[in-house]
Image (tube, helix red, strand yellow):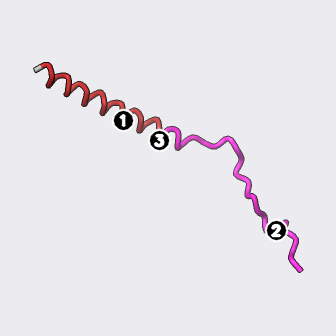
């Protein structure tokens, strides 16, 4: 019975860690970036080719 209890407890702990990691990943993906969203190319200010 001890092995069955250990296996069940390990499964519960692993599931809790997976759910916690999922919440952390989602929170990190929803974080706003530190840098401004400035385009590298602006077609209005580019000089035309001849």
**Residue 5 at x, y percent in the picture:** 16, 22
Q: Which residue is under mark 2?
A: 44
**Residue 22 x, y percent position in the rendering:** 41, 38
Numbered range of the magenta stretch: 26-50
Report the number of discs: 3
Label 2 secondary element? loop
- Which is more N-terminal, label 2 or label 1? 1
Earlier residue among tags 3 and 2 = 3
Residue denoted by label 3: 26
Residue 7 screen position, x and y as percent: 20, 27
Residue 40 occupies quadrant = bottom right
Q: Using the numbered discs, state the Cα–Cα distance from disc 3 to disc 2 in whole angstroms.
A: 37 Å
Q: Earlier in the sequence, mark 1 or mark 3?
A: 1
Q: Are marks 1 and 2 in contact (CB under 8 Å)?
A: no
**Quadrant location of the C terminus?**
bottom right
Q: Nearer the viewer, mark 1 or mark 2?
A: 1
Task: Name the residue beneath numbered marker 1.
Answer: 19
Q: Is residue 25 above or below residue 2?
A: below
Q: Residue at x 76, y 62 (%)?
A: 41
């Amino acid at each position: 019975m001890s092995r069955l209890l250990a296996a069940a407890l390990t499964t519960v702990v692993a599931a809790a860690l997976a759910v916690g990691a999922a919440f952390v990943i989602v929170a990190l993906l929803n974080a706003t970036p530190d840098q401004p969203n400035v385009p590298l190319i602006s077609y209005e200010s580019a000089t035309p080719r001849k």
